[in-house]
Image: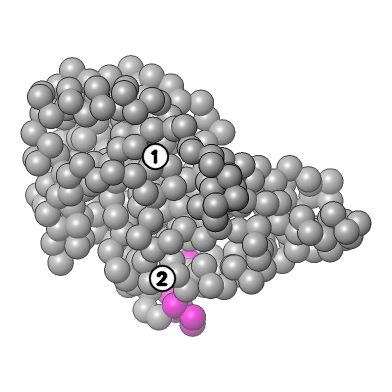
Amino acid sequence: MTIETHQEPALVQSNVFKQLIIACENDAEKVQQAFEKHRSARNAKFKNLILNPSFQQWQFDEILHQVLEAKQGLTQYVDPRNNLSLWSRPPRHIRELIDEIQQILAPIAGPCLWLTPSDHLHMTTLEMLPARTLAEVNELEKFLKENTSLQDIVNYTLSHRARLVRPIVSYDASALALSFIPAVEDRDREVDGKSNKSYSYQYLRSDLYDIVTEAGCQLEARYTVPSAHVTIARFVRPVGWSERESGGSDLFHKRAQELVATIEDINQELRSDHWKRFGDPSRGEWVVGQEKGLELMKGRSWYGKGESIIIGKGFQ
């Protein structure tokens, strides 16, 4: 999700996912709190930014805009970025929830918002190589095939169940996502010799990082903060851009305010114990690996497409 693409890809020298676990004293509740603190702080930051009367800086995705124009035959643009990542695909009930949220938001933003198609939806569980040449991606893929068991990696969720709960819509000036926090379970887990009573999404990411790096592969990553999100929409034009072009700056800001207010209203419902529009709150729970195991993706996969190398076995 572009909620974090303001970060430049950096070479990860140590297991930052484990570092968070250790910083949280190997306490599952503290890890959960770190996820909640991160997403709440980001929403508060961008709410204040967007609602500021001087706000003009929608960071719309120009590459996606060009990709969409090429799809319509208007240009011959080709996204130059190739990636290699492990994805978690949301199960059907999460995809349906996302669709319902998208349909509420779409009329407000109109053509300014690109809605992620259902079959593009994914959560980047472990990014290995972002925005590189296809040759570089192919080289790393070859290395992984020769030095690891890809089947074991994508099937890892069969024996390591990580449950995500309490979704809300996270947003910034460039994209929207459905973000989750890891559940606190009653399972024993050890990190650096210390016991824990939960195996959560942060442990899953940490384990996968160790498996890949212990095979001799150094990773580049953008998504290292405590986040579990599925990008559901991206801005391809500033919200209210047509109003601004016609000289209506007041309408421009009104449209932005309406969008933020609608997101906040959705989140208020999602955070409650009683959902009025979205059914039972249990629809917001997702055990990573439901229906499909992990998926190793390569190529021009920035927006949810690309080449699927291997998919793990799922469970119900």
Residue at which label 1 appears: 300
Q: Is residue 167 magenta?
A: no
Q: Position of residue 293 (x, y in %)?
A: 18, 52
Disc with the residue nearer the chain's start (2 vs 1) = 2
In the rendered structure, which amino acid carries the disc numbered 1? Answer: Arg
Numbered disc in front, either 2 or 1: 1
Q: Which residues are magenta?
A: 271-278
Residue at which label 2 appears: 97
Question: Nearest the camera: 152 or 79?
Answer: 79
Q: Residues within 10 Å of mark 1 (few under 14, many from 20)?
A: many
| Magenta stretch: dominant secondary structure | loop
Q: Position of residue 57 (x, y in %)?
A: 73, 42
In the rendered structure, which amino acid carries the disc numbered 2? Answer: Leu
- Label 2 sits on a secondary structure element that is helix
Q: Position of residue 96 (x, y in %)?
A: 38, 71
> On the picture, is 154 further left or further right than 209?
left
